Image (cartoon, rainbow, N blue to C red):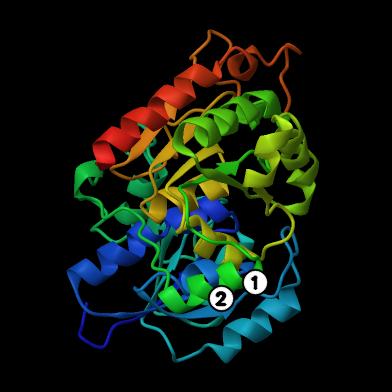
């Protein structure tokens, strides 16, 4: 790549995937100074603005599943002459249309939905050689015949939050860090088969408040508010005032900033899990119907807790057997023990 290399990345549309895409940005800048712009849905801006490798986020004004050929052609033409290479991270055909119409000279991506012609640097994925998503992202920055990147050589995601932005978020929600903060992320956009039961989360919250004199912040979307309330209401009355329900009341930007202020986080396999890991928070990640073998949270202070039953991972939105044992039988004591271990490591 030349010193003036201008790079466009067509980013993923899921929170966790976008966080992990930072591994590609870091690899591109490790090789050489370059300017990286990322074309992605507008909601990605709070993440991209906290990635020091990204020069500018560019809003992709299409809903998931939208084709809108005329609008994509217009957007592509508006970008002509601005980039030397494009990396297309989604595997869909439509995700390759904008860089094609932008006439980016080198358009790199995995073969996906038979995108020959749209991409002119087409890679054929060997899933056995590249088992992790971050390996697949980083491999696109390497020569096509290069050995798969080793996980230990990949720069993990590392979101950066400014103190001013954090203070604004704390003031907006009337929060303080006077006592240790445990962040709970009990939601999962994918479906209920990824959600550890709220009564287990409540037991972890009860232990944190009673043994550490701490407070609990519960994160999530508006859809997670009933679960957040159930966790708080399961606590003894005297402890409920130590719980802040942030589910549904924060923007993604505020959620990122506030997660950076926690002393530890417990999360289902979700986008917030990857954000917490990228913020360097001590994290306990609870897995049930999914597996950490493809998209694990990356960080030095991460513990994955799972049962590994014969029926899991099933990767279903709802338990096909109707019992959800992979999560219901995962006792809070294991998560509490993992939190204690992380505290020792941090000390």
Image: 184 above or below 337: below
Q: Name the quadrant containing residue 216.
A: top right
SS label for mark 2: helix
Displayed quadrant of residue 142:
bottom left
Tell whether 266 sits left or right of 323. left
- 77 relative to 27 in the view: left or right: right
Residue depicted at x 23% and y 58%: 143
Residue 61 seen in this snapshot: yes
Task: Mark 1 and mark 2 in contact? Answer it, CB < 8 Å.
Answer: yes
Looking at this view, is 73 or 184 the one in front?
184
Residue topped by disc 2: 168
Q: Position of residue 163 (x, y in %)?
A: 42, 74
Between 255 and 118, the residue placed more toward the observer is: 255
Front position in the image: 1 or 262: 262
Which residue matches tag 1? Answer: 172
The residue drawn where x is 73% and y is 60% is 249
79 to 13, vertically: above or below: below
Q: Residue sitting at 72 percent across and 80 percent down?
A: 71
Residue drawn at the location 69% of the way across and 36% of the way down: 238
Q: Residue furthest top?
A: 310
* Label 2, residues with CA under 10 Å away: few <14, some 14-19, many ≥20: some
Viewport quadrant of the N terminus: bottom left
The percent position of residue 329, horizontal first and vertical second, equals: 60, 12
């Amino acid at each position: 790549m030349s010193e003036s290399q201008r790079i466009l990345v067509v980013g993923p549309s899921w929170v966790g995937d976008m966080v992990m895409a930072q591994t590609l940005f870091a690899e591109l800048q490790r090789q050489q100074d370059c300017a990286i712009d990322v074309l992605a849905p507008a909601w990605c801006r709070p993440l991209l603005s906290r990635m020091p490798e990204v020069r500018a986020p560019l809003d992709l004004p299409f809903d998931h599943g939208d084709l809108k050929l005329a609008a994509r052609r217009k957007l592509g033409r508006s970008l002509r002459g601005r980039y030397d290479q494009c990396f297309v991270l989604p595997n869909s055909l439509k995700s390759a249309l904008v860089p094609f119409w932008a006439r980016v000279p080198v358009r790199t991506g995995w073969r996906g939905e038979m995108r020959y012609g749209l991409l002119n640097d087409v890679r054929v994925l060997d899933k056995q050689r590249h088992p992790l998503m971050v390996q697949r992202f980083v491999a696109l920055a390497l020569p096509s015949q290069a050995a798969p990147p080793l996980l230990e050589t990949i720069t993990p995601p590392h979101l950066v939050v400014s103190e001013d932005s954090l203070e604004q978020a704390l003031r907006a929600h009337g929060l303080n860090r006077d006592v240790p903060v445990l962040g709970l992320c009990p939601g999962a956009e994918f479906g209920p088969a990824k959600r550890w039961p709220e009564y287990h989360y409540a037991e972890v919250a009860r232990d944190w408040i009673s043994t550490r004199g701490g407070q609990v912040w519960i994160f999530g979307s508006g859809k997670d508010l009933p679960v957040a309330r159930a966790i708080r209401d399961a606590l003894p009355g005297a402890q409920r005032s130590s719980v802040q329900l942030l589910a549904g009341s924060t923007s993604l930007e505020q959620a990122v900033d506030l997660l950076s202020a926690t002393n530890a986080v417990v999360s289902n396999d979700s986008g917030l899990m990857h954000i917490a890991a990228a913020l360097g928070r001590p994290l306990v990640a609870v897995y049930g119907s999914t597996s950490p073998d493809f998209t694990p949270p990356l960080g030095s202070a991460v513990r994955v807790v799972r049962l590994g039953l014969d029926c899991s991972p099933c990767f279903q939105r709802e338990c096909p057997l109707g019992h959800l044992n992979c999560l219901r039988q995962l006792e809070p004591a294991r998560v509490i023990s993992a939190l204690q271990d992380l505290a020792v490591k941090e000390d």
